Image (cartoon, rainbow, N blue to C red):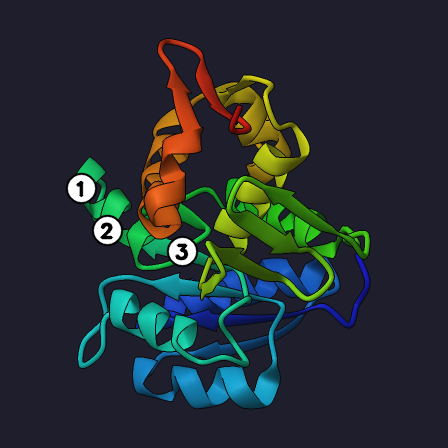
């Protein structure tokens, strides 16, 4: 991995930031670690990380709040975010994804597993997008400009939602299994997080509005985007 890759860690536990900083630096990353979430937004603006590891449960400002602030900043909204949290219930994970996170890792965590997840996210975000646009029905995607319009109106998508919609547009008419989506969009090689797909698909439908009717659920299999006839 290129040693210019930068990662920001925000966790109020010093032991966690020290552990993660050690493992990431061992892999050649440049790391900035914070224990005060109130400094996270300014640090992200100045450090320009290519990924943020963010604890959910912190005093003064929660990871959910920090994530929403980052997603609201036009210059930062595309940075992948991995949540760390001792909150393991499904509802907590859904809240994390809905706030804009790209992945959710429960504490206590394996540093090795977290490193693999970080590498997978950076790998897919590093893949150069071909300069092109795609349109299906009233959905228009400009891949090069990273913009999406629905019925002529621009919509805001997270980096993961953008990759998900891009794959559905590229494979229009073909059923995409949850397992394939996990592999192509999240770079996961197993099916332990299939609910992640459903959560993101629900959020994508909400953002597509009236055009969401073209996004079909194939019961027991997965999803597909269909063209109007």
Q: Residues within 10 Å of mark 1 (few under 14, many from 20)?
A: few
Quarter of the image for residue 78 reads bottom right
Which one is nearer the viewer's eye here, 35 or 148? 148
Q: Give the answer, above or below, for where 173 lies relative to 89.
A: above
Q: Give the answer, above or below, for where 208 lies relative to 70.
A: above
Q: Which residue is mark 1?
A: 91
Query: Residue furthest toward the top?
Result: 220
- Helix, strand or loop at mark 3: loop
Quadrant where the image shows the N terminus: bottom right
Q: Which residue is mark 2?
A: 95
Q: Give the answer, above or below, for where 85 lies relative to 155.
A: above
- Helix, strand or loop at mark 2: helix
- Residue 134: which disc? none
- Labels 2 and 3: the sequence-earlier one: 2
Q: Residue at x 52, y 20 (%)?
A: 179
Q: Which residue is mark 3?
A: 101
Badge 2 vs badge 1, beta-carbon distance below 8 Å? yes
Residue 211 % position (x, y): 40, 42
Q: Residues within 10 Å of mark 3 (few under 14, many from 20)?
A: many
């Amino acid at each position: 991995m290129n040693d210019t890759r930068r990662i920001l860690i925000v966790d109020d536990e010093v032991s966690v930031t020290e552990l993660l900083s050690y493992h990431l630096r061992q892999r050649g990353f440049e790391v900035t670690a914070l224990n005060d979430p109130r400094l996270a937004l300014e640090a992200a603006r100045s450090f320009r990380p290519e990924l943020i590891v963010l604890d959910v449960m912190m005093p003064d400002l929660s990871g959910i709040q920090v994530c929403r602030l980052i997603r609201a900043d036009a210059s930062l909204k595309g940075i992948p975010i991995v949540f760390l949290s001792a909150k393991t219930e499904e509802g907590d994970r859904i809240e994390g994804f809905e706030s804009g996170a790209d992945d959710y890792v429960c504490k206590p965590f394996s540093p090795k597993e977290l490193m693999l997840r970080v590498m997978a996210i950076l790998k897919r975000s590093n893949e150069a997008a071909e300069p092109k646009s795609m349109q299906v029905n009233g959905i228009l995607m400009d891949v090069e400009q990273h913009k999406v319009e629905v019925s002529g109106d621009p919509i805001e998508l997270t980096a993961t939602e953008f990759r998900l919609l891009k794959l559905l547009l590229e494979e229009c008419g073909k059923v995409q299994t949850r397992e394939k989506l996990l592999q192509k969009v999240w770079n996961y090689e197993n099916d332990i997080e299939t609910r992640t797909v459903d959560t993101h698909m629900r959020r994508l439908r909400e953002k597509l509005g009236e055009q969401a009717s073209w996004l079909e659920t194939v019961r027991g299999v997965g999803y597909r985007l269909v063209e109007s006839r």
